Image (cartoon, helix red, strand yellow):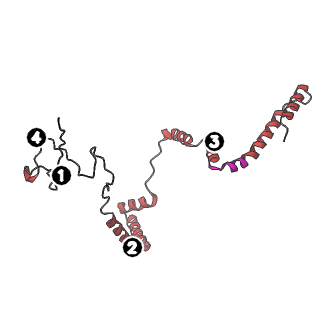
Amino acid sequence: MTTNRVETQPPPSPNGANGQPKSGIDGHAAPPAGGKPAATAPPQGERGAGGRFLPGNKGGPGNPFARRVAALRKAFFEAVDEGKIRRLAEALYEKAVGGDVAAAALLLKYLLGRPAEAVDPDRLDLEEFRLIEAMPTKYEVMRAMIDSVPPATATSLLCPILDDAARDGKKRLFHGIDKGDAAGALKEREYRARHKPK
């Protein structure tokens, strides 16, 4: 009978030696004999065997300075009001008018924003085609309109339109028939008999 032994590694030590005795330079652990550092085992209870976080892991600590930054930003906004910002902008304007290029650049950057890229005349037609291509088709617009309207409302809106279209279609159908033509008159009577209003 053979027994299977499972060797477990001790958890990493707080001195960074990963359970190995301190024997290297400056008290750090010496690298193993292959020149490659030994694989470190994750602390118990944080990660599974594949390295994935186990259920209940709190995750990273987030930004430890977030509260401090928020407090500093709040103090900054409390110290600077609209009047002070206006005076700052006026001083920046005066420097820009006086020839300070950096002040002028900063002022224009906040007033006008970043300049748009120059238009390439060779690509104008292509850009125009892309704009047209990006536009929705009539079918897509109609489908969006239908999908956004409740069925009862859509029915009440479409029925009168469809009835008008059907009446116009009948008029166009019989407009070209010669009334003196016996076959045409017969066709018209048959059609009217089949499609009597109810």
The N terminus, quarter of image: top left
Q: Check residue 33 in the rendering and tell me which mark sits there, or answer none.
A: 4
Residue 59 screen position, x and y as percent: 32, 55
Q: Is residue 153 on the magenta stretch?
A: yes
Q: Which stretch is magenta?
A: 148-156
Q: Which residue is mark 1?
A: 12
User: Residue 24 at x, y = what percent?
Assistant: 8, 49
Of the image marks 2 and 3, the number of the one nearer the N terminus: 2
Circle 1: residue type: Pro
State the residue at coordinates (45%, 50%).
116
Q: How many marks?
A: 4
User: Regarding mark 4 in the picture, which secondary structure is present there?
Assistant: loop
Marks 2 and 3, how far apart in space?
53 Å
Mark number displayed over residue 78: 2
Numbered label attached to residue 138: 3
User: What's the amino acid at mark 4?
Assistant: Ala
Q: Earlier in the sequence, mark 1 or mark 2?
A: 1
Q: Secondary structure at mark 1?
A: loop
Task: Give whichever of discs 3 and 4 has the lower sequence position.
Answer: 4
Query: Which three-letter amino acid code belongs to the residue tagged 2?
Result: Glu
Q: Are marks 4 and 1 in contact (CB under 8 Å)?
A: no
Q: Quadrant of residue 180?
A: top right
* Above or below: residue 71 compared with residue 131: below
Nearer the observer: mark 3 or 4; the answer is: 4
Query: Which class describes the residues within 10 Å of circle 2: few (<14), some (14-19), or many (20+)?
Result: few
Residue type for callout 3? Lys
In three-dimensional space, the C-alpha distance between marks 1 and 3, rounded to whole angstroms, equals: 66 Å
Q: Nearer the viewer, mark 4 or mark 2?
A: 4
Q: Nearer the viewer, residue 17 or 97?
A: 17
- Of all residues shown, which one is farthest toward the front? 1
Say whether marks 1 and 3 touch (CB < 8 Å). Answer: no
